[in-house]
Image (cartoon, rainbow, N blue to C red):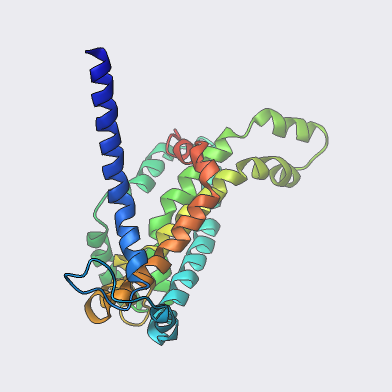
Amino acid sequence: MTRLLKVLTGAAATIVVGLLAVFIFGPLLWLAVRAFVTSWTFPNLGPDGWTLDWWGKVFADDQLSNAVYNSFSFALMTVAASALICLPAAYAFGRYQFPGRRFFLVALFAMNSFPKMGLFVTLASLFYTLRLMETQLGVVIVHVMGTVVFMTWIPAAAFAAVPRSLEEAARDAGAGALRVFFTITLPLALPSILVAVIMSFLASFDEAQGTYLVGGSTYLTMPTQMYRLVEYYPLQIAAVFSILLSIPSVVLLALVRKQIMGGQLAEGFQLR
């Protein structure tokens, strides 16, 4: 009876894992096939032919190539602005106790706890007044709002985890405050800061609603361009564009896989 139960449990686990694999990799496989077929008509079990022409058409289309450029440009600008604003705050949250510290930490986290569209609509009225609609600055501000939690919480936990004894030993040896920071504190916190940078880059790269609302038709990025692709372009073009949109996420997450699996991401959200 026990052996039968183990066999049934193993079979059930195998089925569940198989279904999860189909659920996760099935859409990616469909995209990979669609991106290289000339057409695929029902009831044929296989594609009617294979081609690389769709990839060339994506890069030859000025609108689509401009969307790729905008996505990377906004992501880089967002990471730079977010780091400039949030890293000093993260250091203060991680190393000092001050009135309202816990309130501000919770407030930063709560920014991502509410439906974003309602927040974006509220911001739109302010942006119209400040003439930020359909401007680069307006889009970057919206993107930074989505990265604040990553760029503050994760580095703050990293700064808090740096042993004070190492810094005190460096000061006893004659090192100044800046030298201690750049030779002791920053190198130890750097892996977690890298995770925060990658997560912020991906959050900006994948932002669609705020970009569409604020950027309008002036600044189309890859996520916002996907709306138009589904309606006005062949499915093969949409498949190619979807693959291009997913490549940065896969590559960047693979680069910081060890840090994420090592707990830097989780430690950031355990900051107290």
The residue sitting at 30% across, 62% down in the picture is 30
Left/right placement of residue 166 relative to residue 251 reads: right
Provide residue 149's location: percent of width, then percent of height: 42, 49
261 or 14, nearer to the observer: 14
Horizontal side, residue 164 vs residue 233: left or right: right
**Residue 123 appears at what percent x and percent y?**
29, 66
Which of the 4 quarters of the picture holds residue 53?
A: bottom left
The residue sitting at the left extreme is 43
Asked if one can make out residue 201 in the rendered structure from this viewpoint, the answer is yes
Q: Is residue 272 above or below residue 195?
A: above
Give the residue at x 49% y 39%. 261
Q: Residue furthest top?
A: 1
Quarter location, residue 40: bottom left
* Foreground of the two, 173 or 6: 6
Quarter that holds the C terminus: top left
Residue 86 visible? The answer is no
Relative vertical location of residue 219 with respect to residue 150 in this rendering, above or below: below
In the rendered structure, the answer to whether residue 218 lies left or right of residue 1 reads right
